[in-house]
Amino acid sequence: MTEAIDFRQAGLSAANPFRPWREGIFAALAWGATAVVTWGLPDVIQWGATGLFAILSGLVALVFLALAFLVPLRGWQGGTLTHYGPWFIALGLWLLGWEIVTAKLGWLPKPFFSPPQGLLHVYVTDWDRLLICVAYTARLWGLGFFLGIAVGFVAGVGLGWSKRFAYWGMPLLKLIGPVPASAWIPCAFFIFPSTFHASVFLVALASGIPVAILTASGISQVNRAYYDVARTLGASARWQVRNVAIPAALPNVFVGLFMGLYYSFAVLVVAEMLGAKFGLGWYLQFNTAYSAYANVYAALVVMALICAGLVRALFVVRDRVLGWQKGIL
Amino acid sequence: MPDHTAVRPLGLSFDRVSHGYDIGKTVLPVLEDVTLDIQPGEFVALLGPSGCGKSTLLRLAAGLEVPVRGRVSGDGTPITAPGPDRILVFQDATLFPWRTVRGNVEAGPEARGELAAKRARVDEALALVGLETFGEAFPHQLSGGMAQRAAIARALVNDPRLLLLDEPLGKLDSLTRLNLQKDLVRLWQARGFTAILVTHDVEEALLLADRVILFSPRPARIVQEVRVDSPHPRRRDDPALIAMRSALLANLGVLEDV
């Protein structure tokens, strides 16, 4: 594949001696403009990290400028970098506009809207507290999510496989399943010994229920012929569960996992807003109370990156585990 | 070419077997008073109109179902549960899509905990059906004929004493079909198992089987039995086979000039 690209590249450069990556240049211009405006024009009020923000956007502009010339030299056209070229330009323009309407012109109401250097200031000065909050959130989410999907998966396998288990379990699941996990908050906080336990329970509940429902339906939908094959091959019930029912139901299980993942984020923040001492949800709550909206935005950005990263990670896991599905879907 | 993998074939007998399926309020009768003896090593073809209950006969022989009345026995012992000496190959290859071709062939030995001892046999079974280079392919990457070959390898690796073939070539194109028909005869001769083939194709039945048994529409009763003595490989234009074909088609209610 690289050879093909190199070959095309060679053909191109024979026709035109040199052509820099155009979008790279535009991105450099947009980020450069942000740097110049931030540095050159006065702020309406003091925001803290104005100089640092100008320097950083200037550096990004220089990187894009360098890349604009490196891309054709190295034959990187058509790669991930050039694919996102328009996004780099848009990001630069977005920062420029954001900078102008907040810090430079003060058009947006002041405590609620923070300029980019306001957020940067939070990361520079409050990074330690943010990091602790991320760690607390990660602990709560990790415990809750993995506990929830483990229990949900086992329960789903039981419900899908065993008629007696389904007889007692399915009505309960159908009754409890549709209730939003956050509705359990009042009960959870006095049933469990600590708020942490209660929060773990809520996250586990939110992520476990869709996994249980989809695993159960996946297993009950497995083509009966697969079981016939397994039985004639001399397979025990246990082997059939592990090697027929579960793999056949995995596509459904992953749908449940994605749903559980989204629900877990939703309930995570709510759980942390109640009685927690640290965590991103608490950080949001605490800083809203003090009208420190720059901190709120900064935490939101961190949260968005973490959640998107986890969703992406689940996609990677799914593609690995369900590789056999390619061409079927 | 008998080889070291030849098995001791199973003799099968259906003794006044009746069977039906519960469809809500009533029971749909599928088999009525079927008595049939199949000799060890025999290749029998079951022929009859669609949905007449031939496949049910195979499911009973496999032990996937137990007849409502009558008795199905293998070498004199009643068949009440499935077991790896009697293996069913379906019309759809029903390969496990999440396993590679090799993984599918390994399924039987693995399920019985014999895989470690049988690894060489897995390779052998793949080679026997001409899929030795496709071991790591996933089922969705195979053509219909290759998938059916893989299904046959998955059955043969268990050294079945009885191979039950439920229209295994029914969905294949005619060229693939011809090749697989030859392969089935070759495998049957090499391994010496007892084979029962359900088919709609009169010609296929006559080309492969020692005996062709014709069933009535549901509930299935045996209408006619034809013994085919021509040695393998048989030719489609063998006048004896053509005569039998006409007689069977007439009994199936199809006009002579088809």
Image (cartoon, rainbow, N blue to C red):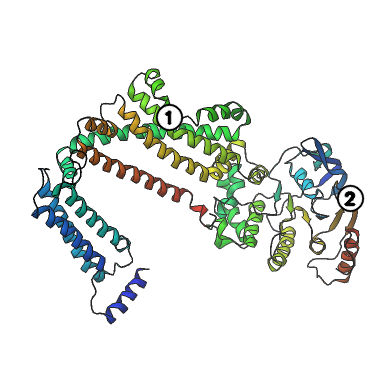
Q: Position of residue B54 (x, y in %)?
A: 80, 50
Please rate how many residues cluster around mark 1, counting C-alpha atoms within 10 Å: few if below 14, some from 14 to 19, many from 20. many
Q: Amino acid at mark 1?
A: Ala
Horizontal relation, residue A185 to residue A326: left or right: left
User: Are labels 1 and 2 on one chain?
Assistant: no
Q: Is residue B223 above or below residue B76?
A: below
Look at the numbered disc 1 and give the secondary structure of its residue.
Answer: helix
Q: Amino acid at mark 2?
A: Ile
Q: Is residue B17 above or below residue B226?
A: above
Q: Which residue is mark 2?
A: B222
Does any portion of residue B76 appear in the rendered image? no
The label shown at residue A181 is 1
Q: Quadrant of the C terminus of chain B?
A: bottom right
Look at the numbered disc 2 and give the secondary structure of its residue.
Answer: strand
Q: Position of residue B195 (x, y in %)?
A: 77, 53
Residue B191 occupies which quadrant of the picture? bottom right
Horizontal relation, residue B171 to residue B101: left or right: right
Q: Residue at x 56, y 45 (%)?
A: A248
Please tell me which residue lies in front, B176 or A215.
Answer: A215
Q: Residue at x 40, y 22 (%)?
A: A188
